[in-house]
Image (cartoon, helix red, strand yellow):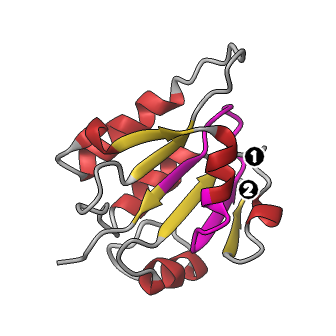
Amino acid sequence: MLKGIPKIISPQLLKVLSEMGHSDRIVIADGNFPAESMGKNAIVIRMDGHGIPEILDAILQLFPLDTYVEKPVSLMEVMPGDTVETPIWDVYKEIITKHDDRGADTVGGIERFQFYEEAKKAYCIIATGESALYANIMLQKGVVV
């Protein structure tokens, strides 16, 4: 146990967050995301019993978002023709605003299949039990000062 570390952050995840350097990316994936196949060249951490908002909040307590890119947070865009609502995106923006003065301005969207391609380059993919659709989020790490 350590003081100041959110309890949801496992030793494995803490090690990964510490290893990540400036501009490395981490995907926090919903329960439908193909984490194992997308993460063949990444570290995959299973957190099946948890939702993305609680994990996002904990991670952002420990590392900054990149200030050298306009949109260090990427969401998987809803496919044309899908009628899925994405209220979880508003939750993400509230959490991000708690940890980064730029708030929702840090958030951009990536087309679904492009998101998959970018996820294949991520340092780590966290597989969650999140049931919200289109809940996948990618964070680009900034410089710790």
Asked whether residue 112 is drawn in magenta, I would say no
Residue 2, placed above or below residue 73: below
Task: Give the Cα distance between marks 2 and 1.
Answer: 7 Å
The answer, for residue 97, to whether it is visible in the render is: yes
Residue 92, placed above or below residue 114: above
Between tags 2 and 1, which lies in front?
A: 1
Q: Nearer the viewer, residue 40 or 57?
A: 40
Label at residue 48: 2
Q: Are marks 2 and 1 in contact (CB under 8 Å)?
A: yes
Q: Residues within 10 Å of mark 1 (few under 14, many from 20)?
A: many
Label at residue 97: none
Asked whether residue 123 is drawn in magenta, I would say yes
Element under disc 2: loop
Q: What's the amino acid at mark 2?
A: Asp
Q: Residue at x 70, y 44 (%)?
A: 113
Image location of residue 33, percent across then percent down:
75, 49
Image location of residue 75, percent across then percent down:
52, 41
Q: Quadrant of residue 86?
A: top right
Q: Residue at x 23, y 51 (%)?
A: 100
* Disc 1 target residue: 31
Image location of residue 93, percent across then percent down:
36, 36
**Quadrant containing the C terminus in the rendered view:** bottom left
Highlighted range, magenta? 118-138
